[in-house]
Image (cartoon, rainbow, N blue to C red):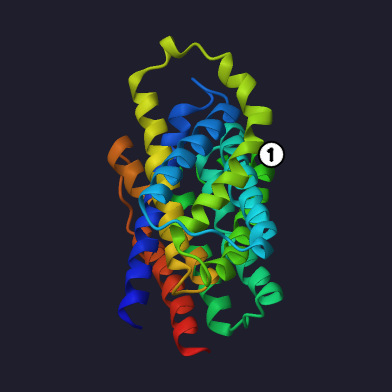
Amino acid sequence: MNTSQIKAHIALIVVNVIYGVNFIAVKEIIPHHFEWQSLALFRGFGTLFLCIAAWLWGRRKKIERADVGKFIVAGLLGVTVSQSLLVWGLQHTSAINASIIMTTTPLFVMLFAAFILRFPMTKHKIWGIILGGAGACVLILSSNPKGVESVRFISLGDAIIFANAVSFGLYLVLTKPLMAKYDSITVMFYTFVFGTLPILLYGLQPTLEVDFSTVPVITYIAIGFVIVFATFITYILNAASLEYVNPTTVSIYVYIQPVVATILSMTMHHEQFHWYKIPSMLLVFAGVYLVSKSNSSGN
């Protein structure tokens, strides 16, 4: 593993720590103060403005006409659909359910990468996904004081989060070839240009109806975190990582998010630490290791 790959793995750890915190931030915003459509609008356009600033400040690179359609699809999947489905789903289900369902992302990435990019489905990848998923589910369920029975089987919110896992997995796979031709800022700029504008269709009206004077400061701070850290920085780091590792590796780090969520739950809600959470966390990291090993050895 060379220096660039090591940096990519470190970036992915940072990304998923931020995503773990993002579940709490989103729950602070919706549905108490804003509807999901408004948060999708804030997140999309707030990040787009940051992308425009970064693109103008850095090296501006035009995309080839043949790639315009690819960027439109990437924008619709990675911004319009994925971001909207995440906040919409969280408005109708718990963070626990959402975290469990999002651990299915690596499965869809592996399947899409196999069919679209012709990546091999190796035994290490399969076992890594199984171990990581098992550790994440055990960790989340053990952190719930009511246990498995309190986790609803299927609801509207669960179905929406599941659709988000599929769309984000496809987005990661389709973005991989674009990263081979363009830098991360260029990819992100055009992705948000094409992906943010459609959000106006369903996000503008609910936003205009908000009484902003009644919104507490902590909610605005949470929105700022979602825009700057959980969107702008994470998308750049994800895109940059795709230059050096494949989409399956990027997606497997989703299993870190339940670890972060558990630690935050213990800190903020004074949850008691149980010994069985240690092997659960080890399973998560074992899954990441196996997939990473598969990508470096070709097995």
Taking the image as drawn, is residue 137 in sight? no
The kind of residue on which mark 1 rests is Ser
Note whether 16 is above or below 130 in the view shown. Answer: above
Q: Foreground residue, 135 or 5? A: 5
Note whether 199 is above or below 2 in the view shown. Answer: above
Name the quarter where the N terminus is drawn: bottom left
Residue located at (42% from left, 52% from top) = 234
Q: Position of residue 265 (x, y in %)?
A: 35, 42
Note whether 144 is above or below 180 in the view shown. Answer: above
- Count up the numbered dots: 1
Residue located at (38% from left, 33% from top) = 224
Relative to 292, is 175 on the left or the right?
A: right
Q: Position of residue 260 (x, y in %)?
A: 36, 51
Note whether 78 is above or below 116 in the view shown. Answer: above
Q: Which quadrant holds residue 7? A: bottom left
Label 1 sits on a secondary structure element that is loop
Taking the image as drawn, is residue 180 in sight? yes
Q: Which quadrant holds residue 139? A: bottom left
Residue located at (67% from left, 76% from top) = 114
Circle 1 is placed at which residue position?
155
Residue located at (33% from left, 36% from top) = 269
